[in-house]
Image (spheres, helix red, strand yellow):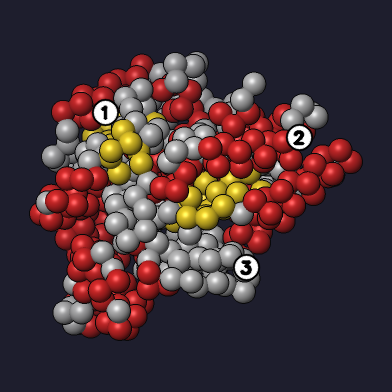
């Protein structure tokens, strides 16, 4: 049996019952990474010494019946914006070339204390400021369904590491969709946590008011266990999930615009499957979302420029121009415009909460487009800008509205659906997602 193709949850259970040794599992991943022809496009750097030392400790605990968590001994990858002590962390940018942190990011410290094994750091969009995953400065990770296409950003290598079987799961970050877009395009589950739920200490920032940490993995159960590991606690109980009586709001405005035909057809099919399973689906509109998306250019770029403007001004030529230009767009906005955009966003959040009250979650397509070809993005500047905005549009609703959000794969490759729940409602969201996952996989919910 090839355990590298199994979910993190399955691996954890096998370790628990003595049927799988963490050292052997970790070595299998390290061997597979070393032999993989696309490894250098996926991993920025592998950490074999750390991984094997952590796996050996996990193996000893397993034999003594002293495991620290259900995922103790399971090897995962980390996006290259999480600080790792003594290991280069560059956030996909030559602005940070050779940067070596003195300590691990806090979430990495917590997860290591829960027994998970760090395989290494994965490539990403430069400074996390793109939903596409194209990075000519470092490497552009491939999409599992099309090696010539981008894998989605900014947690591009994170998704590829799991989808290509080079990590059991991955930890990424999501500021406008950076966990959920690559998850959707690589047929994975991606969880965006609520802003403020998980620590950003030791995480290279983009927009701190929107930055979040979350897992990319194979199953909803994996997502629940990984969230628990990131927080150092017990996971949500996903047993006994039923969809009878569940009410989903199907958002109609904005998120259904400009969808590729196959995605639109697939989305309607998913809604039909859920309705057959007993879910009540109610179409709704929230006009304020369009206004918030229009304001996002100010909200994001002003904060991003405030964070990175000095460094970019000092070395503008080391950046991919399309990413640099997004940052530079934040120079021109006034303080008044930024504050007014935030005031409108707070009003929109109140309107959204009112419109979605009484529903278990809001459902939308994860992305209106499939993963674009990398060459076309490089060759056509206008196409890059349009594709980037479209890739981020649906997921960004969750960030702007301050929600917990999860992307689930469907039967159509590189095509996911989003479930958006209220802030700090991850446990309820995960239980609901587990039921939806069963339906989409053809199991009885």
**Residue 137 position in % (x across, y down):** 32, 61
Mark 1, residue position: 267
Closer to us: mark 1 or mark 3?
3
Q: Nearer the viewer, residue 185 or 92?
A: 92
Say whether marks 1 and 3 touch (CB < 8 Å).
no
Disc 3 to disc 2, C-alpha distance: 26 Å
Disc 1 to disc 3, C-alpha distance: 43 Å
Question: Which label's residue is closer to the chain start, 1 or 3?
Answer: 3
Q: Secondary structure at mark 2?
A: loop
Residue 260 falls left or right of residue 66 = left
Q: Nearer the viewer, residue 135 or 272?
A: 135
Query: Badge 1, how many Cα within 10 Å: few under 14, some, many 20+?
Result: many
Residue at the (74%, 40%) spot, across then down: 23
Image height check: is 366 above or below 331? above
Closer to us: mark 1 or mark 2?
2
Tell me, for residue 439, which label it has, or none. Answer: none
Q: Secondary structure at mark 1?
A: helix
Q: Residue furthest right?
A: 64
**Residue 24 position in % (x across, y down):** 72, 36
Image height check: is 413 above or below 54? above
Tell me, for residue 21, which label it has, or none. Answer: 2
**Residue 217 position in % (x across, y down):** 51, 39
Question: Which label's residue is closer to the chain start, 1 or 2?
Answer: 2
Q: State how many labels appear.
A: 3
């Amino acid at each position: 049996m090839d355990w590298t193709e199994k979910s993190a949850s399955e691996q954890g259970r096998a370790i628990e019952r003595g049927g799988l040794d963490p050292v052997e599992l970790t070595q299998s991943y390290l061997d597979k990474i070393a032999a993989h022809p696309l490894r250098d496009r996926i991993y920025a750097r592998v950490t074999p010494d750390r991984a094997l030392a952590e796996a050996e400790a996990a193996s000893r605990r397993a034999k003594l019946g002293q495991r620290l968590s259900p995922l103790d001994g399971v090897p995962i990858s980390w996006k290259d914006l999480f600080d790792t002590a003594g290991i280069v962390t560059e956030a996909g940018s030559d602005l940070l070339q050779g940067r070596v942190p003195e300590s691990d990011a806090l979430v990495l410290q917590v997860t290591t204390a829960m027994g998970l094994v760090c395989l290494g750091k994965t490539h990403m969009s430069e400074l996390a400021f793109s939903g596409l995953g194209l990075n000519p400065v470092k490497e552009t990770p491939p999409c599992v369904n099309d090696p010539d296409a981008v894998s989605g950003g900014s947690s591009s290598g994170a998704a590829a590491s799991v989808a290509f079987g080079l990590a059991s799961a991955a930890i990424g970050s999501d500021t406008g969709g950076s966990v959920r877009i690559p998850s959707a395009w690589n047929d994975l589950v991606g969880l965006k946590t609520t802003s403020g739920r998980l620590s950003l200490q030791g995480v290279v920032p983009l927009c701190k008011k929107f930055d979040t940490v979350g897992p990319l993995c194979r199953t909803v159960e994996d997502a629940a266990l990984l969230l628990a590991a990131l927080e150092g606690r017990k996971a949500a109980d996903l047993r006994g999930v039923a969809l009878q009586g569940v009410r989903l709001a199907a958002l109609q405005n904005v998120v259904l615009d400009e969808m590729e035909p196959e995605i639109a057809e697939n989305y309607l099919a998913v809604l039909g499957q859920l309705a057959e399973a007993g879910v009540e689906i109610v179409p709704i509109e929230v006009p304020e979302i369009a206004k918030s998306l229009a304001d996002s250019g100010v909200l994001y770029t002003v904060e991003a420029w405030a964070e990175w403007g000095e460094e970019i001004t000092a070395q503008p030529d080391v950046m991919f121009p399309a990413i640099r230009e997004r940052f530079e767009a934040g120079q021109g906005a006034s303080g008044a415009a930024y504050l007014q955009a935030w005031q409108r966003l707070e009003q929109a959040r109140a309107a959204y909460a009112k419109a979605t009250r009484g529903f278990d979650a809001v459902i939308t397509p994860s992305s209106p487009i499939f993963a674009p070809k990398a060459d076309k993005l490089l060759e056509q500047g206008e196409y890059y800008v349009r594709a980037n905005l479209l890739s981020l549009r649906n997921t960004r609703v969750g960030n702007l509205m301050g929600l917990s959000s999860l992307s689930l794969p469907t039967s159509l490759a590189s095509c996911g659906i989003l479930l958006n729940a209220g802030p700090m409602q991850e446990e309820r969201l995960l239980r609901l997602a587990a039921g939806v996952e069963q339906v989409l996989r053809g199991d009885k919910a």
